[in-house]
């Protein structure tokens, strides 16, 4: 029998009703043997995620402010879960130990990790699965670097002992025994690590959407869902802002050749999106998805005879490096280069950077355009196929949108265009209509 690892996110576990749905999903397929859980998320729009409450608890403690109310709020969520699910997972005792630890000094990572820990205890009890604490097997090095191979070996041995287990996501342990968390959304990473350790045939990531959509539904009306996408295509799309999955969750399963299936707990019959190692070029599909981001700034530099001056670009890049600014794209002409930078990196630095470029590189002119948007049209089916950019540019021309920048990756899997921020939504709609409708 093959094995599936299923990770459930915060909204899939927000209350007893949602947890019952996850049990139905798990029970429906005996291959779903290793379950990774997030902390309970929001039950309704204005609700708080348990993890956010835990961070708030920590900041109160740090500022010596009374924290009893917040602690009660958190405790209550788990007591109610226990009661409504009709299980005894020892929450009373767990919270007594937690309170003691808070009084004697607890790190922020320890506090933040308890959402996953308590939730996994309750869900293991409810499913009748073994609780396996990530603290003992998900390992970080001295400097907080995640130890992937050590973790894989430890988890492999630990999980082999149990046919069915629940593992809390988001955290592991430092060499000194202290808890260390991944960055926010990190339960996705734990799910990926567990899938690799047990040699799963698929890593199911259960969330509240039926996978990735071909474009942002706030811009395009009812965009089509993406049924399959390769890791590479996904990277291009998430870089531009399409996000469902933690970026670092891809690596462990990718290494082991395990596909990821994004699924919807509230609509379990939907097939969701399958993320695979190989590009699937089927049915003549050209474009897999369109994503974009507003708020880029362009610094356009002109210097006479730049093209013959050795080391010019290096000198410009060194200045950006001095200001700790990362660059998205560097389109260039004969005697010009433009630096396309996410505007948030330039807060309070832009004037100084421009002055430095003018003085230190003796540029003839440095002009700044703010408010540019970048749009990536991504698809493995675009490679080696003539006419793709013609279709793209014609769509933008017909919509009377001026293209300010063009950049095609060498893999030919991606064409990025820069347009005026105010044209952003119209441009995405036009590209979607041209390729997908
Ligand atoms: N609970 C953590 C967070 O809210 C981790 C996760 O859910 O993946 O970021």
Image (cartoon, helix red, strand yellow):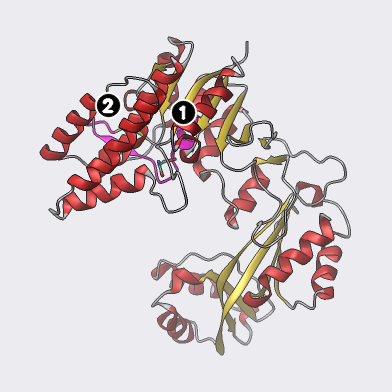
Residue 142 is at least partly visible in this image: no
The part of the image, by quadrant, that contains residue 392 is bottom right
Q: In this view, does 405 lie to the left or right of 136?
A: right
> Is residue 375 positioned above or below 145 on the image?
below
Q: Quadrant of ligand 1?
A: top left
Name the residue located 27 percent from the left edge and 22 percent from the top edge: 90
In-front residue for pair 353/169: 169
Write the residue at 56% across / 46% down: 244
From the viewer's perspective, tell me whether residue 395 is left or right of residue 272: right
Q: The C terminus appears in which quarter of the rendering?
A: bottom right
**Which residue in the rendered view is the most extreme toward the bottom?**
364
Which region is colored magenta?
A: 174-191
Q: Which mark is residue 36?
A: 1
Occupied quadrant, residue 321? bottom left
* Residue shown at 32% from the left, 40% from the top: 144
Q: What element carries label 1?
A: strand
Side of 138 relative to 253 (left or right): left
Q: Residue at x 51, y 38 (%)?
A: 249
């Amino acid at each position: 029998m093959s094995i599936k690892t299923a990770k459930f996110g915060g909204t899939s576990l927000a209350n007893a009703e949602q947890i019952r749905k996850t049990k139905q999903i798990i029970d429906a397929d005996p291959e779903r043997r290793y379950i990774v859980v997030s902390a309970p998320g929001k039950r309704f729009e204005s609700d708080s995620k348990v993890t956010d409450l835990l961070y708030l608890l920590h900041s109160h403690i740090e500022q010596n402010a009374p924290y009893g109310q917040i602690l009660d709020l958190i405790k209550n969520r788990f007591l109610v879960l226990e009661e409504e699910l009709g299980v005894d997972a020892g929450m009373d005792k767990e919270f007594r130990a937690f309170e003691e630890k808070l009084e004697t000094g607890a790190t922020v990572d320890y506090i933040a990790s308890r959402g996953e820990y308590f939730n996994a205890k309750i869900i293991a009890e409810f499913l009748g699965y073994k609780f396996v604490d990530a603290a003992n097997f998900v390992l970080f090095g001295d400097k907080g670097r995640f130890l992937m191979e050590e973790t894989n070996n430890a988890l492999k041995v630990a999980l082999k002992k149990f046919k069915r287990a629940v593992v809390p996501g988001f955290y592991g342990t430092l060499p000194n025994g202290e808890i260390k968390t991944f960055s926010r959304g990190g339960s996705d990473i734990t799910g990926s690590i567990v899938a690799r350790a047990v040699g799963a045939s698929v890593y199911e990531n259960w969330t509240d959407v039926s996978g990735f959509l071909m474009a942002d539904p706030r811009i395009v009306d009812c965009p089509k869902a993406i049924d399959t996408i390769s890791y590479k295509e996904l990277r291009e799309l998430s870089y531009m802002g399409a996000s469902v999955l933690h970026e670092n969750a891809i690596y462990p399963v990718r290494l082991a050749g395990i596909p990821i299936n994004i699924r919807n707990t509230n609509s379990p019959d939907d097939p969701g999106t399958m993320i695979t190692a190989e590009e699937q070029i089927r049915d003549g599909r050209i474009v897999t998805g369109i994503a974009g981001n507003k708020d880029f700034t362009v610094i356009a530099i002109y210097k006479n005879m730049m093209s013959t001056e050795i080391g010019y670009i290096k000198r410009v890049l060194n200045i950006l490096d001095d200001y700790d600014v990362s660059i998205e794209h560097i389109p260039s002409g004969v005697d010009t280069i433009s630096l396309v930078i996410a505007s948030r990196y330039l807060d309070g630095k832009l004037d100084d950077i421009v002055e430095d470029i003018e003085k230190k590189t003796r540029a003839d002119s440095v002009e700044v355009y703010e408010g540019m948007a970048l749009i990536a049209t991504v698809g493995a089916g675009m490679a080696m196929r003539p006419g793709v950019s013609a279709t793209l540019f014609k769509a933008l021309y017909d919509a009377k949108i001026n293209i300010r920048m063009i950049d095609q990756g060498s893999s030919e899997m991606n064409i990025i265009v820069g347009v005026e921020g105010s044209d952003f939504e119209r441009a995405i709609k036009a590209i979607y209509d041209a390729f997908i409708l």
